[in-house]
Amino acid sequence: MSSAEQTRDGVSLTNLDQPLAPGVGASKRDLVDYLDAVHGRLVPWLRDRPLSVVRTLRGQAPFMQKNLPKYTPDWVRRTSVWAEASHRDVSYALCDDRRTLLWFANQRAVEYHPTLSTADRPGHPTHLVLDLDPPEGADFGVAVAAARLVRQALADAGLAGAVKTSGAKGLHVLVPVDGATSAEEAAAATRALAVRAERLDPALATTAFIREDRGGRVFVDSTRAGGASLVAVFSPRLRPGLPVSYPVGWDDLGAVAPADFTVRTVPALVADRDPWAGLLPPPQRLPDDLVEQGRGIPVARVQAMHEGRRRARARRAAQSP
């Protein structure tokens, strides 16, 4: 067996010395070694959740894979989920163990995006997500400031959350919720929390889904709800240096940068403990008034779609003789 090939946990790993993707500055071996090193930390946050992955194949643009390919080994657990958009069942993987993670690594799967719900309870997300997306070119500090607005909005509602880097330029605030929480309630509460955070400092944060309406502010994205997925904590991101989505204590937010957490630095940081498990609060019941407020707030994506159509009609009318 060549140095570019080996077997781990019964999985054949091939072409390990190939560059992973243009501009990333890492090899396939770097990806495999990282995922193997942190499998004990990453797999628990993937287990029992329908999984989408971002893969990068030689000569192709990166792509998101939901449906498992036909050549997937029989030992990879899977679950079937009805996709309303495409009107078909999608066969998602359940990455429950090291062997499955290594198989995905050999498939050049770089990013791991589990759903907010487990496979056996699809209508009950285990947490809310506020995704904080700073404007192009902005300093990471504005994302930190927006995260603190979300923390305050949560505290005002009697809730608590934990924060992690997105692995890109933003932050994710996660709020564990109790098992009785429905997808509809979670989505409504997420919208209400986003609006409350925006109201705390409308010059810094916005819930405007249409990019041109954000005015250089941090976008507080409330649309990760229902059947949505989110890049997992400890997952790499397909960007230069292979940064990693990593948990940060609230008091430490001002002292870190996303580039601090990469496939080269994270294994040592998680060798002795799971920092995410130590930061997440226990599941909480959503306040009734928060859910009711959210029910009165339009879904940002749907509202933006209608607004986009309205603007297009206005442009056409303005251009007509």
Image: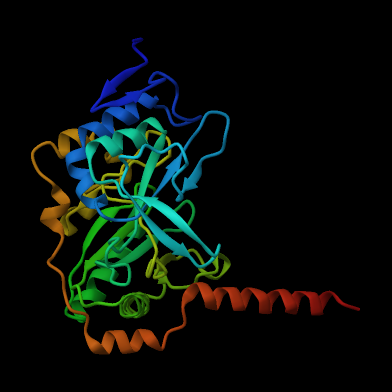
Residue extending farthest top: 2
Residue 145 location, x and y as percent? 30, 63
Q: What residue appears at the point 34 percent right and 11 percent down from the top-left corner?
A: 3
Foreground pick, 75 / 321: 75
Looking at the rendered image, the quarter that the C terminus falls into is bottom right
Looking at the rendered image, the quarter that the N terminus falls into is top left
Quarter of the image holding residue 125? bottom left
Q: What residue appears at the point 44 percent right and 45 percent down from the top-left corner?
A: 68
- On the rendered structure, is 205 left or right of 247? right
Q: What residue appears at the point 48 percent right and 75 percent down from the top-left corner?
A: 300
Position of 32 relative to 218 (above/below)? above
The number of discs equals 0
In this rendering, does residue 207 appear at all? yes
Position of 155 relative to 268 (above/below)? below
Foreground pick, 274 / 66: 66
Residue 4 location, x and y as percent? 37, 15
In this rendering, does residue 262 appear at all? no
Residue extending farthest front: 74
Quarter of the image holding residue 287? bottom left
